[in-house]
Image: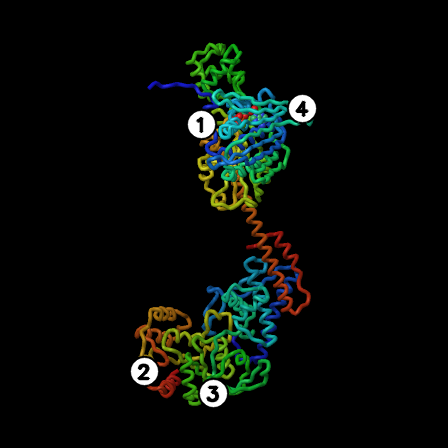
Amino acid sequence: MVSNRKVSALERKKEVLENLKRFGAEIYKQMMLGRFPQIQMPSRSIENIYYNPELRQYVLGNKTVRRSARNIRHIRPFTQLVWAAYFAYELTSQRKTSTLRDVYYSSQAYEVPFKDQPESNSIITDLETVIGFSREDFNIFPEERSAVFGDLTIEYTVPGYEGKRLNLTSHPDGVMIGPALTSAEFVKTSADKVIAIEKGGLFTRFIEERVHEKFNAILVLTAGQAPRATRHFIHRLNKELELPVYIFTDGDPWGMHIAMVIISGSANAAHLRELTTPDAKWSGVWATDIVDYKLPTDPLTEIDIKRLYELQRDPRYKDKLWQREIKTFLKIRRKAEQEAFSRYGLTYIVDEYLPAKLEET
Amino acid sequence: MAQTFEEISPADFFYRNRDIAGFTNPTRAIFTAIRELVENSLDAAEQIGVPPDIYVRLTLEGKTTHGTEIYKLRIEDNGSGIPPRYIPAAFGQVLFGSKYKLKQMRGTFGLGGTMAILYGQITTHRPAYVVSSTGGARIFMYRLMIDIQRNRPIILEKRTMLNKTGWRGTIVEFSLEGDYFRAMPKILEYFKQTAVMNPYANLTFVDPRGRLYIFRRVTTRMPPPPKETKPHPYGIDVELLQRLIQITDCKNMLDFLKKHFHRIGDNIARKFLEFAEIDFLKDPKKLTHDEIVHLARAMKSFPDFLPPDASCLSPLGEELLRAGILKELKPEFIAVCQRKPSTYAGHPFIVEVAVAYGGEIPRKNDFILYRFANRIPLLYDEASDVSFKVIHSINWRRYRVTPDMPIAILVHICSTKIPYKTVGKEFIADRPEVKKEILNGIREVARQLQRYLSKREYAERQRRRLNIFAKYLPKIAEFSTKLAGMEQPPDINGLLRSVEKLGLES
Ligand SMILES: Nc1ncnc2c1ncn2[C@@H]1O[C@H](COP(=O)(O)OP(=O)(O)OP(=O)(O)O)[C@@H](O)[C@H]1O
Ligand SMILES: [Mg+2]
């Protein structure tokens, strides 16, 4: 499923539109034959989600579910799904974008209202499963926005900006990873690596400290758990530009997991590909860093510890490094934030820690 | 001090004890007066098999010194009429009546109508006015008062008129003290329930405010009239035995039993006399007092008498009961059940039960209970009545029914002797035999109600389903047509029809 081939953003949109249309045509055909339309799609129930060690991500198994308009309990979500496909088709073909919140409200205009936001979100996830593309591909974006900064020139494909180019060092706050950037083509770069950072404060510090120049890096702010558009963006940087990816997070189970979702994805997205970057590296802050650099710390809470035990059993965490760090956390029972390096001065993290860690990982 | 003894007449007795006849206070009295006279009129029409037309008017005449009002009550009917020689006694003499027979009638004691007039006389000192004709050449008019001490009518005026139109019926008019506004809810309820039980009657009531209440008949069919019957041996007592022995002209016990008792033939008479060790040929008039007592006891304990037959009863019947409920209560659903005749203490009785649901039946916190005895509505002392107890002993959840649903339950008992607990004729005692019939009847109609409710629920579910499909299928058609880039949307009518026809996988 994962392709190394460079699919241009435009070709990808074409495929999305075709899939949406084929879905509609299939339902149309069944109804013209006087049948209740039905569809078959992979089951996303927990029993059908497997960790695939080769792909290094969660995938869906062979179980499928049938949704039939003949079934009283299915007909409403079925209708919502067909509507969502139509809505996505209109968005994508008119090259407009929307958000999950927008979808929720738009449905009311078509008299197929959702009862709440989770119901609407879950229909969009169904549509992803049926179409085989992630919602960003049919122009539905999340609210949260992350950013990128570094020497990468892109070319827009969105209406009004077609052919326009931008160098991602143009704005000192970084450039938002939104619909326009997600669908842009990569033109050229001088960078040789990608550094993903959990927190905005450190991202700004790195730009001020010219980390992008000193380390020849494209800097990506994940702003906490990376949104899917950002994960897909990192995936593209890795696959299309063949850049290695290093991830810096807080030194606690939650930071660890931010890195892991970028690397191996989440169970929630088992129906999707091209959101993961299996070769990306978690560079810190490790538990062993806390010990080695004598960082100021806080004690682990009960919830932190419970989470660590969960991660210890998670198949994505079976590698030696992860297991060692989990054990160390459990041993020292302490955690540290990225900002903890400031005790050694504002530039220490860039001058000392970063080079060492890039070396190490 | 020497005690004085005096004898009082029946009229005097009831005058002193008017409570027990239902003339407790001005509110209750006006209700009872209307009720007694309406019932006399219904009896009079039914007796000759004519659908009753009854007109009742109550007008205000003035106030008393103690805050109540004086009303004039007038009732007109199209019943049998009263032969002129009986008119004064029928209305001017307590315990005089034509209904002391063993057959089901509303009236029994020869008391009700006369007590109403007596009460009017006591409270207003005015005479009553009666006009009646049996449909013959003449109409008779009387103005009467009652000599309470002597229990005799006093005729103040008598007139005879030519009956040019062939009119038949009775008009009674008299004044009485009362409190209509307090009594009004019960009076209106009485008319409504009477209309339920008598769907073949036209009832008209003009109240003191001039309001007109009309309850129209929906049928002219009437229940078959009851036949007169002989006493059943299980219901006998020494008193009655002695009376029968006095009047009989039979010369031996075998003939005596066969002639005077209900359902005793030659065979059973012989068996019984063997059982009681009484000579077949003994002259009944020669029985000693002890022998009579022994005979009465033996009658109660002999196991092989046939049960009394119910031809002396006049239940309303399922069809008329349904018509009456439908016309007055306008429910959505009715189930009725007439139980087979049964007996208690030698008295035959029949229980009729109905349940009505929905429509104009109001929702209350409890089931609405309508009680009737010999087609008379019982409006007081509901909680003491056997039906009330039966209803509250049933586990209604078994029938998927709760008391907050709009449900009315109707129980009608008819018998030659209603087991009233009091002379006030308001509620029925807990006789186990009667209780059992009521219980079984209610169970039967409750089962029917349950079936109806679940059918309705199923239909409702089907309708909701169809609505859902009718709502969503066009949308699926619309959006898939657009997505597929087609012009002509698929026709979904066939799919909707199949939803209607088949029911669906759930
Ligand atoms: N409207 C009427 N038409 C014909 N006969 C009547 C009418 N009203 C009364 N009678 C006659 O007068 C008699 C006495 O009536 P009354 O109401 O006093 O007693 P009842 O009806 O026999 O018994 P109960 O005390 O139960 O009412 C009746 O038995 C009946 O023969
Ligand atoms: Mg009477």
What is the three-letter code of the residue carrying label 4?
Leu
Instruction: Judge left or right: residue B365 versus residue B215.
Output: left
Residue behind mark 3: A191
The secondary structure type at the circle numbered 4 is strand
Residue receiving disc 4: B162
Q: SS at mark 2? A: loop
Q: Which residue is mark 2?
A: A293
**Rendered image coloring scheme:** rainbow
**Of the residues under marks 3 and 2, which one precedes in the sequence?**
3
The image position of residue B135, as x and y in percent, is 65, 24
Front in this rendered view, residue B309 or A135: B309
Question: Could you say where residue B498 lies in the image, as x and y percent from the top left?
Answer: 63, 54
Using the image, determine if residue A126 lies above or below residue A341: above
* Pointer 1 residue: B17
The three-letter amino acid code for the residue at tag 2 is Tyr
Q: Chain ID for label 1? A: B
Residue B26 location, x and y as percent?
A: 48, 34
